[in-house]
């Protein structure tokens, strides 16, 4: 049975991707800080609790993951955003965001590439529409996501000969708990926002392409623009 590792699997986009991969027949190892409290109820789902913004904890799960030769999918989903004037963001938040959004995906890719090459597997990096443009109050978040997008596209050039694909998925605003601590949120109107399941469906579509074809980047947007300021 092929195994997928999904970070950020406890909710939102990572949970939707995990559900989809379980439906497609993969064993899923789901990673997040609180994954034990909210495991997906499926016999082929295994929860692995880890704070990926802590480099020590991140290092501690690598040996465990490397012991599984069946890993053929790595989905780097865990991440968070802060959208404030840059001088108002504290250094700990900067460090935490860089580690979670960028260092952890690069470190997990590094650790799992041997198995991914053996299985001719695929890495999905969930970046953001912000990886492709430049927005006010998004310098830190955009830097992490643009970095992850550049990592994805460059790594593909390196590993394509081994049969490994690396995909940068760049979603627009998606209705999840991502916005819980932010000053704005997605529109309530269905054509002005994405759902987490839309991202999972895109991954299913890519996995169904014939072998020998590699989609390396996908930007997913709502048909219409929408954003709500919180009261
Ligand atoms: P979400 O609902 O807030 O989910 C975030 C996930 O990341 C949760 O499973 C969370 O689990 C996990 N996580 C957070 N901090 C972590 C840490 N330190 N260590 C391990 N896991 C951690 O947000 P989402 O919308 O699904 O976001 C998923 C990804 O999509 C993020 O990378 C985000 O930047 C990207 N994205 C989101 C949107 C959007 O509009 N929602 C748009 C573009 C891109 P725990 O709390 O259990 O740790």
Image: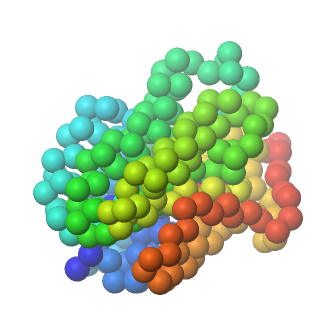
Which one is in front, 171 or 152?
Answer: 152
Quadrant of the image containing the N terminus:
bottom left
Which one is in front, 107 or 47?
Answer: 107
Q: Position of residue 159 (x, y in %)?
A: 37, 56
What residue appears at the point 41 percent right and 46 percent down from the top-left corner? 105
Q: Residue furthest left?
A: 67
Q: Position of residue 121 (x, y in %)?
A: 34, 67
Quadrant of the image containing the C terminus:
top right
What residue appears at the point 70 percent right and 47 percent down from the top-left corner? 132
Q: Position of residue 144 (x, y in %)?
A: 56, 36
Quick check: 52 left or right of 147? left
What residue appears at the point 63 percent right and 63 percent down from the top-left corner? 218
Q: How many numbered marks does the figure carry?
A: 0
| Residue 127 visible in image | yes
| Residue 38 visible in image | no
Q: Position of residue 86 (x, y in %)?
A: 68, 21
Q: Is residue 121 above or below residue 105?
A: below
Which image quadrant for residue 118?
Answer: bottom left
């Amino acid at each position: 049975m092929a195994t997928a590792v999904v970070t950020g699997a406890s909710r939102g986009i990572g949970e939707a991707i995990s559900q989809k991969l379980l439906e497609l027949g993969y064993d899923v190892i789901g990673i997040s800080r609180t994954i034990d409290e909210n495991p997906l109820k499926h016999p082929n789902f295994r929860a692995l609790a880890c704070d990926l913004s802590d480099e020590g904890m991140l290092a501690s799960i690598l040996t465990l993951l490397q012991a599984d030769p069946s890993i053929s999918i790595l989905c780097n989903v865990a991440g968070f955003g802060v959208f404030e004037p840059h001088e108002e963001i504290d250094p700990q938040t900067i460090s935490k965001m860089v580690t979670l959004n960028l260092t952890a995906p690069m470190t997990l890719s590094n650790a799992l590439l041997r198995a991914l090459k053996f299985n001719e597997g695929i890495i999905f990096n969930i970046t953001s529409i912000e990886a492709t443009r430049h927005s006010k109050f998004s310098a830190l978040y955009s830097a992490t996501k643009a970095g992850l997008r550049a990592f994805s596209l460059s790594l593909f050039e390196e590993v394509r000969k081994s049969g490994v694909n690396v995909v940068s998925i760049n979603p627009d605003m998606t209705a999840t708990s991502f916005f819980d601590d932010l000053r704005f949120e997605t529109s309530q109107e269905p054509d002005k926002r994405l759902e987490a399941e839309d991202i999972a469906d895109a991954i299913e579509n890519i996995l169904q392409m014939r072998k020998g074809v590699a989609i390396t980047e996908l930007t997913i947007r709502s048909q219409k623009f929408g954003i709500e300021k919180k009261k």
